[in-house]
Image: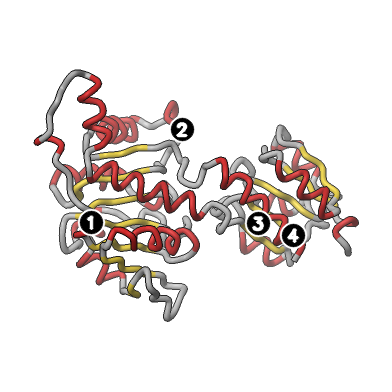
Amino acid sequence: MSQNQLSILIADEMHPSLFAMLDQAGFRYDYQPKITRAELLTTLLPYNGLIIRSKTSVNEELLAQASNLRFIGRAGAGLDLIDLDAAERRGIRVFHAGEGNRDAVAEHTVGMLLALLMNILKADREVRQGIWNREGNRGYELGNMTVGLIGYGNNGHATARRLSGFGCRVLAYDKFLTNYGDAFAEEATLDQIRAEADVLSLHVPLTDETRMMINDTFIDQSGKPFYLINIARGEVVSLSAVVRGLENGKIRGACLDVLENEKLTKLTSDQQIVFDYLRQSDRVVLTPHIAGWTHESYVRINEVIVRQLLS
């Protein structure tokens, strides 16, 4: 079947650059970013392809209504919204645009870390209040540290490449790769990273294995106090464990672009207590799941998706 015979449903809001790319490639598509779940269940049957972002969950219920579906394209990196086993059973190809936002993620990671190490956000708030406190904002140099990356795919590798310019030592662990050490990072075991890292940065998908991977046990067994960076998925990290780590000194500071529950108006009472602690701490830098969310990456993600469609 040629691309001009394929019919694609785009069920999430996309950057408008996508449409010119699809038109040029000769794909037929319907753009329905406001489609409801109920409408999607009754609409999907005729389509051969489905393109989504982060709104649409693709599970057994949905796939049962999509007997003509041949592929699912995720305009982003994470695949935790897609039941990969169910798709595989039906012979449906799943691809994502992990390389599309890797540079943005890497720059955001380094930016958050520098802001934390150099007290940039704290110092900025104080100066705006007329407080000129130089000694209280003395920072730490990244170049003297060992950074441990858990996950060495697109985002991990791009982050290591940028860290190499600071002169710090970079260790990388990835259970799915072999012989992946390179000019930017040394191949390491998870135990080695836990023992030696001054900074721990997470670059893993959300799976049953990685869910709550950073918990009290992981933190307590770390060889030295460390800075934590999570730009992956919120549920990879137990935030209550992070609070305990900050309180007992095992965690020196945290950069959190993602949270267990990102609907801040719908936190449970326990989640609210944890969030209130984090947002009031000068040792925590928070951003609203925007690592990878740049003007350039928005376009690049679409380029990757269309290139994969064509191939």
Which tag, 3 or 4, sits closer to the chain's start? Answer: 3
Between residues 258 and 296, which one lies in front from this camera angle?
296
Q: Which residue is mark 4?
A: 309
Residue 308: x and y in percent read: 70, 61
Residue located farthest toward the left when viewing the structure as drawn:
135
| Real-space CA distance between mark 3 and mark 1, rounded to the nearest whole angstrom | 37 Å
Element on which disc 1 rests: helix
Q: Residue at x 35, y 37 (%)?
A: 286
Element on which disc 3 rests: helix
Q: Which residue is mark 3?
A: 304
Which tag, 2 or 1, sits closer to the chain's start? Answer: 1
Q: Which residue is mark 2?
A: 263
| Real-space CA distance between mark 3 and mark 2, rounded to the nearest whole angstrom | 29 Å
Between residues 22 and 139, which one lies in front from this camera angle?
139
Horizontal placement of 76 versus 164: left or right?
A: right
Judge depth for marks 4 and 1 and give the one in front.
Answer: 4
